[in-house]
Each structure stands twice: as C-alpha cells, then as structure tokens.
Amino acid sequence: MSICFLLFNSLSLLGACKEPFSLKFSEIATESIKISWIDNNNPLLGYQLAYGLKGIGLTQTQKTDIGIQTFRTLTDLNSGTAYIFWIRAVCAPGDSSKWEVHFSFITALTNPSAWP
C-alpha cells in the first residue's frame, strides 16, 4: 500500500496541468483579434497569455494573467501586422502547463484608398 501512496505522491509532484488546445481565431479586424481555446483542466485558476510581433521569442514577451475565460480579444494591434501568441493553463500555485505551441496571425489590412 505504501508503494501506491508513494507513486501517487510522485505523480502529483510532476504536475497534472495540461496545455489548452484547439486554438481558434475570430473577429479579425485591423487593430484587434479574438482568440479562443478549449481546456479540460480541473481545478483551474486561470490562464497566462503572451504575445508580440511575429519573430520574437517567448522570453521577449510580457506574460499576462487573464482569468478563467477561454477566450480573449487582443486590442491595440497594428493593421496588416503579423503577431504570435502563446497560452498556458494555471491549475494551482506552482502547477502550470507548458506554454502551448505558439500560433501566429495577421491583422486585417487597412485599405487607404477609397472607391471612386
């Protein structure tokens, strides 16, 4: 019985928090975009989001805690610009998932010319 207890405790030290999955984009605009994902973690304290211009690394971004909603609208972006983002779940203090593999997107391009 002590072997089972030891095995259970060893597994819990490894962290059970899994990465969010099935990331999607919607509402793509010139200065904003909505991202959403699916998550099956329980318990869940929230998520951390990191994003920046495409080509930068995760270590060059600012990480933001964003609560427990499985969506986020990124605003104040530049038109026609490529961005990259990462997301991870936070299940408990000291138990976060790996950063989900980065995803990139391009905001809509502002058309400066008007139709005649």
Image (spheres, rainbow, N blue to C red):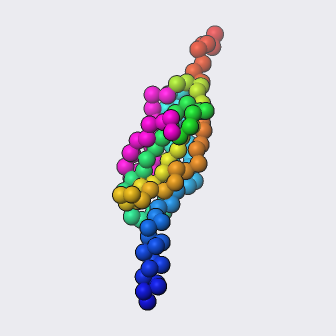
Instruction: Classify 98 as above or below 34.
Output: below
Q: Position of residue 32 (x, y in %)?
A: 49, 32
Q: Quadrant of the C terminus?
A: top right
Instruction: Classify 74 as above or below 41.
Output: above
Residue 4: in magenta span: no
Q: Quadrant of the N terminus?
A: bottom left
Name which residue lies at 39% across and 64% down: 43
Residue 67: in magenta span: yes
In front of the other: 59 or 65:
59
Instruction: Classify 74 as above or below 14.
Output: above
Name which residue lies at 59% across and 48% down: 101
Q: Position of residue 42 (x, y in %)?
A: 42, 65
Residue 84: which quarter of the image?
A: top right
Residue that sits furthest to the bottom in the current view? 1
The region drawn magenta spans 59-77
Figure label count? 0
Name which residue lies at 45% across and 32% down: 75
Q: Position of residue 112 (x, y in %)?
A: 59, 14
Residue that sits furthest to the right in the current view? 116
> Is residue 57 visible to us here?
yes
Q: Position of residue 26 (x, y in %)?
A: 54, 41
In front of the other: 55 or 1:
1
Residue that sits furthest to the top in the current view? 116
Name which residue lies at 50% across and 35% down: 60
Residue 13: which quarter of the image?
A: bottom left
> Is residue 27 visible to us here?
no
